[in-house]
Amino acid sequence: MGRVAELVGVSVRTLHHWDAIGLVRPGGRTWSGYRLYDAQDVARIHRVLVYRELGLALAEIGRILDDPSVDPREHLRRQRTLLTERIRRLERTARAVDEMIERTTMDTTPPTTQGPTDSTDTPGIGISVEEQARIFGTDWDPAWQDEARERWGDSEVWAQSAARARGRDAAGWQALKDEVDDVETALAAALAGGVVPGSEEANVLAERHRATIARHYDCTHAMQVVLARMYTEDPRFAAHYDQRAEGLGAWLRTVIEENARTHGVDPDTATWQ
């Protein structure tokens, strides 16, 4: 096990864990109980590492690799496609960060105090590029703010978001991200546990989800429904939630819609108001 850990660049503890959960089990053992990995086992480890790099959960990776209908070559083709998509996202992120660095260099105002001067500006998040990368991760794309401004730049909620962003430091952004992570973890657990949309437990989760949005602007139940449509219609949102748990985006949309009904909102006709 120690030799394999060194070869593939993971810890022995990681291999122990993968063995315990059935993700990668060694093909044999010595008479004294030491694990023995053959070439096929090591190849599976490499496939796991690629999927982990792509952000998939271990349980999802296990389901993919153990699917009897998919042969190893198909796994490699799928990994190649996913890697290409990831590279494109990272390249977009790198370009956006380069642009932010350039703007920061040209601006005499310190990055920690920068912010929009009116409601039509992109909400400045008030923290350095390094802090942004640390808090939001490598998949975060600052260009998404430009896309959001195109949709809502002249709206009242955009002005609210800008004002609240100006008052939030790095610790505040980290706390907000931690809150979102906690809510999404709870949502994934509820999906796995068979929580039914429209139930009291599901409605509580829908309200927790809406509360995270309300950290940026006053989010009504109708607005939440409109946002939830993107969780299935926009591949980026769908991929984000499905990384947490397969089908989570679609399930969350239904949870939000059913909760909205209890507050007098018809999801089929809901608009941004």
Image (cartoon, rainbow, N blue to C red):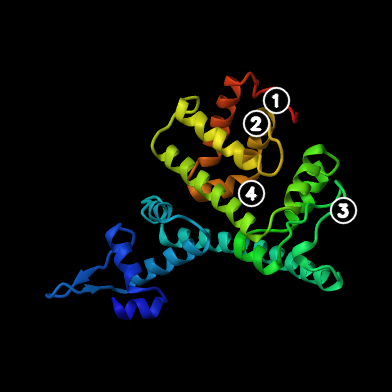
Q: Quadrant of the N terminus?
A: bottom left
State if disc 1 and disc 2 touch (CB < 8 Å): yes
Cα distance, mark 3 to mark 2? 30 Å
* Whether residue 40 can be seen here: no
What is the three-letter code of the residue carrying label 4? Answer: Arg
Q: Does dot 1 land on a helix, a strand or a loop?
A: loop
Question: Looking at the image, do the residues carrying marks 2 and 4 touch, with CB atoms under 8 Å apart?
Answer: no
User: Which numbered disc, 2 or 4, marks the residue that appears first in the sequence?
Assistant: 2
Q: Quadrant of the C terminus?
A: top right
Residue type highlighted by circle 3: Thr
Q: Which residue is mark 2?
A: 225
> Which residue is found at the position 42% from the left and 53% from the top?
64
Within the image, what quadrant is residue 124 found in?
bottom right
Label whose residue precedes the other's in the sequence (3 or 2): 3
Residue 270 badge: 1
Q: Earlier in the sequence, mark 4 or mark 3?
A: 3
- Left or right of 248: which side holds 61? left
Any mark on residue 236, and which? 4
Above/below status of 117 relative to 33: above
Query: Which comes sooner in the sequence, label 1 or label 3?
Result: 3
